[in-house]
Amino acid sequence: MISYADVDTLDAETREEISDLFDHADALHDLPDDLGAIEAWDDFIAECERVGFPHLIASARLSQYTIYSHGGMALEALEAFVELMRVLRSHGDLVDPRNVAVQLNAIGTAATTLADDPRIPLEKITRLIDLVEEQMHARGVDVTGAHVARATVAAAAGDAEATTQWIDRWRAEAGDGWRADDAGVIQMEIPLIARFDSDRAAETLEQRLRVLGIDPVRIDSGAPNADRAAKLAALLAFLRVRQGRREEATAIADALVAALGIEVLAREVVPHYLILALEERPDLALVAVDRLLGESALDASDWEAVAAAARSRLLAQPHGTEGELLRALAQEGARAHDERAGTDVHSRELAELWWAGLPPASPPAITHVPDVWGEPEERAEHILSAGWLGRVGAVCADDPPIAIKYRYQALLGETMQLMSAETAEESDALATRLTARARELRCATSRYAVPLLHGLGAGRRGDVPTMVVGYGRALEELRALPANADHVVPDIRAMGERLFPTVVEQAVASPDVPWDHIHPLVTTEQEVRAATGAPRAPVILAHAEIAAHVDDVDRLQAIAADLQDAVADEQQRIDGGAIYLELVRLVARFSPGFADHLASIVVQAGDAEQIRAATVWRSWLRPADPAVAAELTAVLQEADDDVTELGIVPGWVVLEVLVRAGRKPVAVLDALLEEVDGGNAADLGLIAAGGSLLLGRDADDARGAELRERALAIATGLAQRDGTDVWRTWVGRRWYAGDPAFERA
């Protein structure tokens, strides 16, 4: 085993290995606090064990404890702390003594986390404290953390005398980490006293506030420690209510709101202190209640906070379902704590403080249904559905209510399955069910993503009208959400934004999508982007798509200029190369020189795939230029003549370029058709060119005739929808000259 103290004396190879472990640990600290991070720390511990470096093993165990603790997983947190003690007991002499002191004194806060969960016997917590204190004495570490932990356990047991004795020892022996004037220490000490003696707790807190120079009714929001002062002032307001001094409590609460604002207070202050202090300001109290309900596990560990929320809601709506459900949950939590300790201190606090002045409880019938009330997530969803979900309106899947966060994860997982649905019937049924579930959970991301992905899946199956309808519904969901798109996960919203130009391209090219579906779609997209601040270049490109389709050259020219300005303005937020390649496709029929200019820009500034695509375009636009021909040869070599590696270029352009370059025409055509799964209306050029190619080689070729018929059907459908023969004429002149079917008006 390697001691932390000996690291500098190790050979270069081992020092580098240890250095890598420290770098790895730093990276792990940046991970989200979830079970994935726990597994990553387990892997890291295995690395440290292989090297034999207990210093970082101990740090990793403490990190795991912290993750479990923050996640409300007290049983797992206990086991992680026990694992930490095993490391320190066996190899503590090899760990940096400064770390050992911090790790052992963490028991002071750990005891609170563990005691909050009534499933953990107090005797088990006490045994852990014994282990910690044993190591404290063995290693000469300040034992105050153990005294704090024992005071916490005594308070949980309802033992006022023992609580006072341990607090007195804590104060008498406090080291630097447990100073009486430390705000964090005060917030641990005062509630322990208050459980048995509110007057003494308030008096002690007032003394601490004077030492810190904090006036609870004059909080300076610009002071460096304003949040610390606010937490202590809110605690005093809470105690004033318990003392029967409501006017003083309200005055403190009003001063806090004036100084920091209710949103900051709801985020920073212990919720049940703030909610009780704001009782005479119910609208403000509701902000704190809603913040609490979103962040609470809604289980026995949060019984006081749940009681505060219950009281607030019952005062607003006597016998309201939400308040009664919360009251029933708080009552069960207090009873569980009392049963663990063989006391009634928690239930008495409910009766004397939280239920004072309320009408007798009338628990809803659902509280007697074991399959609901006995299942934590089901119970929590019923509670949140009784009021909170309706008030918040929309929930971001990245910040779901803690108590049912896994239900949001499951909903998002199912939402993504829309992409893999094999049939329209399967997709429709799934979308219907998920739409209803997204509305139940007010999940903004799924409300947006379900129609979006349902439509995208339909588009992949060739059902362009359903794709357009789905995208339109997704836009309407986005527009209907509070604060527009803020509640939709950014990656999902960005996916929709990127999809928009493709939807418009497919819709414009498809005769079965009417214009009265296309124009409103573009208008709504423009409105939503204006509201959300999303890039406008894709909307301008959509207008260009429409102008090019109807041969409105003057409008296309004006739009192209506007689009270039937008690309320049938004170059950090969009893929300019991709947009320019789309513009090349739109203008090539009308202005080959301008198209070549745009393609040249992409060759200079695009990524590798875009450069290949732009080179293909330039070869088509400049067939007699030997320099461009040489560039094409290089591109084809780079792509191994694989047509799927040439980027986003219309298939008919690729076909003409490669045939001219000497490639086998039918082989190229087959590869192109396979790439687009046979093609749809947006592949009109490829379908028409393919039919012409095959019929030119063999007039009796069944495939050639079939492709010709498909091209004719698409072009005729466009003529009927558009009221113009632009596309039928274009196809006829380019590939079927003299064919009367393409000349009919």
Image: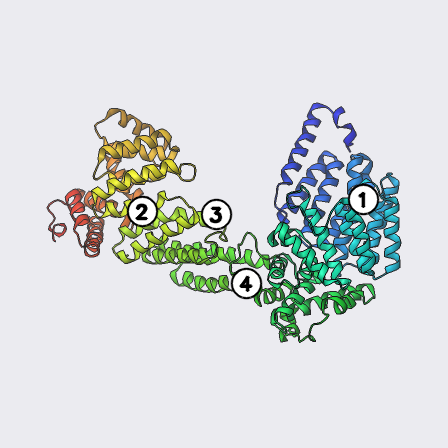
In this picture, residue 630 sits left or right of residue 36: left
Distance of label 2 from label 1 (alpha carbons): 64 Å
The residue that label 4 is drawn on is: 391
* Of 613 and 679, the residue lying toward us: 613
Specify the quadrant of the image occupied by residue 478: bottom left
- Is residue 741 visible in the rendered structure shown here? yes
Q: Which of the two discs, 4 and 1, labels the residue nearer the N terminus? A: 1
The residue that label 1 is drawn on is: 178
Q: Which of the two discs, 2 and 1, labels the residue nearer the N terminus? A: 1
* Of 72 and 185, the residue lying toward us: 185
| Color scheme of the displayed model | rainbow
User: In the image, what residue type sits under mark 3?
Assistant: Asp
Q: Secondary structure at mark 2?
A: helix
The residue that label 3 is drawn on is: 491
Distance of label 4 from label 1 (alpha carbons): 41 Å
User: In the image, what residue type sits under mark 2?
Assistant: Ala
**Residue 596 pos. (x, y %):** 26, 32
The residue that label 2 is drawn on is: 542
- Is residue 647 visible in the rendered structure shown here? no
Q: Tell me what residue is drawn at x 60 percent, y 59 percent.
A: 287
Specify the quadrant of the image occupied by residue 462: bottom left
Viewport quadrant of the N terminus: top right
Q: Secondary structure at mark 4?
A: helix
Q: Nearer the viewer, mark 2 or mark 4?
A: 4
Q: Nearer the viewer, mark 2 or mark 3?
A: 2
User: In the image, what residue type sits under mark 4?
Assistant: Arg
Q: Which of the two discs, 2 and 4, labels the residue nearer the N terminus? A: 4
Q: Is residue 266 above or below residue 225?
A: below
